[in-house]
């Protein structure tokens, strides 16, 4: 069974930065694509960023606009989301997710491709 544990959320002023971490266990981390999603109150969960299994390819939602960076350290079984120039509309619970199956060179932007989810970490951006 795969376990994902996020950390690094918190309260930050607009324009500030946070780095989220997601520690994975339970299978060979380097074999699977990873993603970050978020869900704001009253809204559906949405894609934020994805990375393929070796970290060579990434994808971002349009609203990121170059402010976020996804990365992974396969030696530490951890995926990161660095968030800069945060805006109040970035306020949400952020979830990391692990792909359902061996990913090859692919990454995924749809949540149906992910079988394992963390518990989420709250990010609140104030004015």
Image (tube, rainbow, N blue to C red):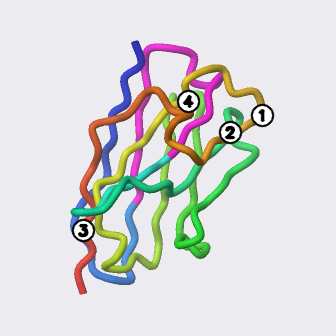
Q: Label 2, on which residue?
A: 52
Quadrant including the N terminus: top left
Quadrant including the C terminus: bottom left
Mark 1 and mark 2 in contact (Cβ < 8 Å)? yes
Is label 4 or label 3 in front? 4
Mark 2 and mark 3 in contact (Cβ < 8 Å)? no
Residue neighbourhood size for the residue with mark 1, other residues' Cα within 10 Å, grouped as few (<14), some (14–19), many (≥20): some
Q: Which of 80 and 108 is in front in this view?
A: 108
Q: Which residue is drawn at 27% across and 80% down?
A: 13
Q: Where is residue 11 in the image (x, y as percent from the top left)?
A: 22, 68
Question: In whole angstroms, how far apart are the C-alphas of marks 3 and 1?
Answer: 33 Å
Q: What stretch is highlighted in magenta?
A: 19-35
Q: Label 3, on which residue?
A: 124
In the figure, residue 75 lies in which quadrant?
Answer: top right
Q: Label 1, on which residue?
A: 105
Question: In whole angstroms, how far apart are the C-alphas of marks 3 and 2?
Answer: 28 Å
Disc 2, SS: loop
Work out whether mark 4 precedes mark 2 in sequence or the reverse, and give the earlier one: 2
Disc 4, SS: strand
Question: In whole angstroms, how far apart are the C-alphas of marks 4 and 2?
Answer: 10 Å
Work out whether mark 3 precedes mark 1 in sequence or the reverse, and give the earlier one: 1
Q: Position of residue 122 (x, y in %)?
A: 24, 56
Work out whether mark 3 precedes mark 2 in sequence or the reverse, and give the earlier one: 2
- Disc ID at residue 99: 4
Disc 1, SS: loop
Question: In whole angstroms, how far apart are the C-alphas of marks 1 and 4?
Answer: 12 Å
71 displayed left or right of 43:
right
Residue neighbourhood size for the residue with mark 2, other residues' Cα within 10 Å, grouped as few (<14), some (14–19), many (≥20): many
Mark 1 and mark 3 in contact (Cβ < 8 Å)? no
Question: In whole angstroms, how far apart are the C-alphas of marks 2 and 1?
Answer: 6 Å
Q: Where is residue 34 in the image (x, y as percent from the top left)?
A: 56, 38
């Amino acid at each position: 069974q795969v376990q994902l544990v996020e950390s690094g959320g918190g309260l930050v002023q607009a324009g500030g930065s946070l780095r989220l971490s997601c520690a994975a266990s339970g299978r060979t981390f380097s074999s699977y694509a990873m993603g970050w999603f978020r869900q704001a109150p009253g809204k559906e969960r949405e894609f934020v960023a994805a990375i393929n299994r070796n970290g060579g390819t990434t994808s971002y939602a349009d609203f990121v606009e170059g402010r976020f960076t996804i990365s992974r350290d396969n030696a530490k079984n951890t995926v990161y989301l660095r968030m800069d120039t945060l805006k109040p509309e970035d306020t949400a619970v952020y979830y990391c997710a692990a792909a359902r199956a061996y990913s090859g060179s692919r990454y995924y932007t749809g949540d149906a491709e992910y079988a394992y989810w963390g518990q989420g970490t709250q990010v609140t951006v104030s004015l």
